[in-house]
Amino acid sequence: MLLSGLVMAGGVFACMYLVRAFLLMRFPASMPVPTSLSLLRLLLWSVGITALFVGGTALVRIVSLRQGGSSIADMLNARLVSGQPVDGLDRRLLNVVTEMALAAGTPVPAVYVLDGELGINALAAGWQLDDAVICVTRGCLDKLTRAELQGVVAHEFSHLVHGDTRLNMRLVGLVWGLQMVWGLGVALWEPDNEGR
């Protein structure tokens, strides 16, 4: 840990000296060249502003997810399976989720299906058990037997019961913040309508 910190600090100072050397070669001698201390100050301000931007946008996204797992399912355009489904596969899924909730001693979460996804996958989302959802792909319904589907759903219930989904909801916010930095960089890098 100490070694990696020293390597990182060395890298930062090496970058600062490279920038200083570039500025000395690029600009005339009459122009003031930034010192290492001013470059370090610039670096710290840049890191601070970036951290505030990422943290602020992540906080906005986390607040927008306050409805729980259903907000994640809505972001994915998943279809809610409720009541008395007509489709036999949907009914089987709802029965399996209900059985697993009984076995785990938890409330029955909302059940969603990602109809456009043909691969075998599933997810659990939510801040707590009361707002949790379980979402499976169309591939799970079409390709898995009932016993296999029970295994997939049981795995997702383990995420709900052990609180993994709370961390995942926070990570969705953080990734959103990082994506906003990337989007800002792309927007600033791309030329405008006049090619500048």
Image (cartoon, rainbow, N blue to C red):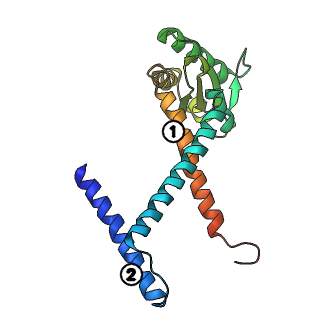
Res 13 → quadrant: bottom left
User: Identity of the amino acid at label 2?
Assistant: Ala
x 48%, y 12%: residue = 104
**Which residue matches tag 2?**
21
Q: Is residue 196 above or below residue 46?
A: below
The local crowd at label 2, few if under 14, some if 14 to 19, many if 20 or more residues have their Cα within 10 Å, is few
What whole-number distance in Å separates the C-alpha atoms at marks 2 and 1?
Answer: 40 Å
x 42%, y 82%: residue = 22
Which residue is the extreme one toward the left? Answer: 3
Q: Position of residue 182 (x, y in %)?
A: 57, 57
Q: Position of residue 111 (x, y in %)?
A: 63, 23
Q: Nearer the viewer, residue 104 or 16?
A: 16
Residue 31 seen in render: yes
**Left or right relative to 15: residue 125:** right
**Which residue matches tag 1?**
171
Residue 121 seen in render: no
Task: Kindly state the secondary structure of the residue where label 1 is placed.
Answer: helix
> Which of pointers 2 and 1 lies earlier in the amino acid sequence?
2
Q: Give the position of the C terminus as an image quadrant.
A: bottom right
Q: Nearer the viewer, residue 141 or 99?
A: 99
Task: Kindly state the secondary structure of the residue where label 2 is placed.
Answer: helix
Q: Position of residue 44 (x, y in %)?
A: 45, 58
